[in-house]
Amino acid sequence: MSKNPWFLAPFAPLGTLLAVVVVAAPSADLHAQSGQPDFLFSPPSLNVTLRGGLMDYQATGQLFDFTSDLFTTDASDFRGRTLGIELGVRLSEHFEATLGLDGGQVTVNHESRDWEEVDGSPIRQTTRVRSGPSGQLGLKGYILPQGEQIGQFAWVPNRANLFVSGGIGVTAYEFRQFGDFVNEEPDPALIFSDDYQSEGAAFLMYAGAGGEVTLRRNLALVLEGRYQWSEDELDGDFGDFEPINLNGLRLTAGLSVRF
């Protein structure tokens, strides 16, 4: 695997966001040290969240079953990292519209179950599932108001809050298998090297829930669990298979900067 995975390319601007976080935190500290209350002058109109975590694919269906039958892997192996950024636009004290961009990759190394090399060594392959860039448009609903208006010029964010979320989107994806394989037709069987792949774009829906903890007046920790439903017709080398199942659970943690 390359040192700079392809799915990180859309996230180059995240370095700028990290710089904003670094600058914002000391600014909040100086504000508190001055003896003034830790508040905003008005409710934030938007926030930007940088998040990362785990993507656990359901890994069921004909293609994944075929992979598990031939190679030493199963559905529980298809877990990998995910990275994303989300823009939230305030609609009211309880609701927020969101626009997200994510990407991730799962790489599983395995061996042929029933065959081995002439010298007894394993016949090795790799299955790689790449997801993203994935764009989502969603809605987030907070259980409690996001903050409290005090007087005419002060808005204090809630220390902690819970939310539910849901939305739709489109994700690019690639399913790829490369390495050494066995052709059982000849006698004796033939071992050969190849690289099979299929790629496309799939519609997705998601539902989730999570919580926010305010760290400073304009900075919060965000935890979220989200389940995604998505499938698509395969093409390329896997065109004869049934649609690929891209369903899965995503667990992320991130920092949100309020503006």
Image (spheres, helix red, strand yellow):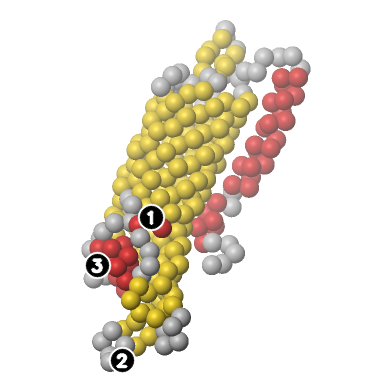
- Is residue 90 shown left or right of residue 166? right
Residue reaching furthest front? 120
> Is residue 85 depicted above or below 29 in this figure?
below
Task: For residue 143, say whether it is visible.
Answer: yes
The residue depicted at 38 percent of the width and 45 percent of the height is 249
The nearer-to-camera label among 2 and 3 is: 2
Tell me what residue is drawn at x 59 percent, y 13 percent.
Answer: 154
Q: How much space separates mark 1 and mark 2, taking CA atoms?
A: 34 Å
- Amino acid on which the number 3 mark rests in the picture: Phe
Which circle, 1 or 3, is nearer the viewer?
1
Dot 3 falls on a residue whose secondary structure is loop
**Which residue does the numbered mark 3 point to in the structure image?**
241
Quadrant in which the N terminus is drawn: bottom right
Mark 1 and mark 3: span between their CA atoms?
21 Å
The mark nearer the N terminus, 2 or 3, is: 2
Three-letter amino acid code at the position of disc 2: Pro
Compute the Cα span from label 2 to label 3.
27 Å
User: Please, what is the three-letter code of the amino acid marked with disc 1?
Assistant: Ser
